[in-house]
Image: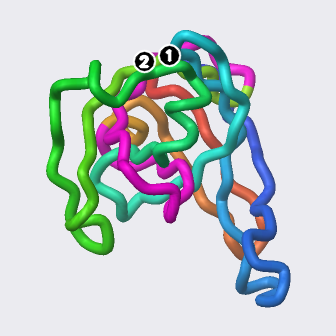
Amino acid sequence: MTSPAQSFPYVPRDPSLENAGLAPMLPLTLTGDRSVATSGLVDSGATVNILPYAVEVQLGLDWDQQTRSVELSGNLASVEARVVVLSAVVGSFPPVRLAFAWARTDAVPVILGQVNFFLGFDVCFFRSRGLFEVRPKS
């Protein structure tokens, strides 16, 4: 049985840009040693999920204990990153495991990309209506 989609509004990331500054930010709760409520930019052009450094610190993780590194590309090519797998609650769906590249920078938001957010969720963007829908894969 397919879960019904949940709708979320585009939210302002840069109010000075008015309508052009709206982005598909998905509320989620991540759990490491502690839980953190945050939001992630749903980015179908991103190869991997990205976590900024400060979010993982809030979750209670220790950089030096994460020994698996991952190479980032694009604007983050020069940033060191480590692999972390976390439990995540997306909207009101049951918890899922999401793999992230924990970037040693806070210059990016949480990003939900192809690996592995889009492998576990179907997303429909309705930009002209200012909303997007998310549902777990069937």
76 with respect to 94 (left or right): left
138 with respect to 27 (left or right): left
Mark 1 neighbour density, 10 Å: few (under 14) some (14–19) many (20 or more): some
Badge number at residue 87: 1
Label 1 with label 2: CB-CB less than 8 Å? yes
Tell me what residue is drawn at x 50 percent, y 64 percent.
107
Which element carries disc 1, helix, strand or loop?
strand
Q: Where is residue 110 drawn, in percent x and y?
A: 53, 48
84 with respect to 112 (left or right): left
Q: Earlier in the sequence, mark 1 or mark 2?
A: 1
The residue indicated by pointer 2 is 97
Tell me what residue is drawn at x 40 percent, y 41 percent.
118
Q: Kindly indicate the quadrant of the structure image that contains residue 7.
A: top right
Q: Where is residue 90 drawn, in percent x and y?
A: 63, 28
Q: Is residue 6 above or below residue 13?
A: above
Per the rendered image, the range of residues in magenta is 92-115
Mark 2 neighbour density, 10 Å: few (under 14) some (14–19) many (20 or more): some
Amino acid bearing label 1:
Ser
Front in this rendered view, residue 103 or 137: 103
Q: Is residue 81 above or below residue 14?
A: above
Magenta stretch encompasses residue 83: no
Q: Where is residue 92 drawn, in percent x and y?
A: 74, 21
Magenta stretch encompasses residue 104: yes
Front in this rendered view, residue 15 or 26: 15
Q: CA distance from mark 1 to mark 2?
A: 5 Å
Tell me what residue is drawn at x 57 percent, y 17 percent.
31
Q: Is residue 13 above or below residue 33?
A: below
